[in-house]
Image (tube, helix red, strand yellow):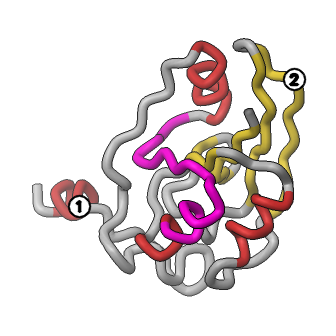
Amino acid sequence: MKFAISTDSDFVSEHFGRCPSFTLLEVEGGKVLNKEVIGNPGHHPGYIPQFLHSKGVNCIIAGGMGMRAKSFFQDLGIDTVLGVTGKVDKVIEDISRGNLKGSEGLCRPGAGRGYGIEKSECDHPEDKDQKNK
C-alpha cells in the first residue's frame, strides 16, 4: 500500500494543502519498501489529490483537511486519515505496525487558508484555549 504524509520538516503538517512537502512510502507486510520526500506541487483545488493519485497513493495522512479536499480524495478512491500529529518517523512506525490512529481533523473549516503564505498562525481551538489562560 502506498501512503502520502503531509509533511512540514520532520513533523506531520497541520494543514494538508499548504504543507511544504509530502513523505511518500510504500508498505507491504509491515515493512517499508520505499520512502521518498517530494515537494508540494502547488495548492490548487483538486490538483494535489490528482497528483498523489498519479503517484499511486492509496492513503493520505494529515493533521487537517477541508471537506472539499476529502471529497476529491474520496472520488479517487484514496483513504484519508486526519488528526495525526507528531514526528513523521513515529507515524511511519505506526503504519508499519498497523496501529496508526486518526481522529477528528485539527482545523475548523477555513483554518488553513493562507498557511505558509500570508497567515502567521493557525486557528486551532486549543491555540485559542491556551491564549485565554
Count neighbours of disc 1 (C-alpha within 10 A) and say few if under 14, some if 14 to 19, many if 20 or more: few
Q: Nearer the viewer, residue 38 or 116?
A: 38
Q: Choose between 26 and 87: the one closer to the eye.
A: 26
Q: Residues within 10 Å of mark 2 (few under 14, many from 20)?
A: few
Q: Residue at x 70, y 41 (%)?
A: 3
Q: Is residue 86 above or below residue 38?
A: above
Is 132 on the left or on the right of 68, as rendered? left
Q: Is residue 9 left or right of residue 117?
A: right
Q: Secondary structure at mark 1?
A: helix
> Which numbered disc, 1 or 2, marks the residue that appears first in the sequence?
2
Residue 12 to residue 113: above or below = above
Quickly name the residue at label 1.
125
Q: Is residue 75 magenta?
A: yes
Rounded to the nearest angstrom, the CA distance separating label 1 from label 2 is 37 Å
Per the rendered image, the range of residues in magenta is 71-86
Side of 88 relative to 40 (left or right): left
Rendered location of residue 41, percent (x, y) = 81, 72
Secondary structure found at label 2 = strand
Q: Residue at x 74, y 13 (%)?
A: 29
Amino acid type assigned to the residue bearing label 1 in the image? Pro
User: Magenta stretch: residue 127 in it?
Assistant: no
Residue 101, picture quadrant? top left
Residue 59 % position (x, y): 63, 45
For disc 2, the marked residue is: 33
Left or right: residue 129 compared with residue 108: left
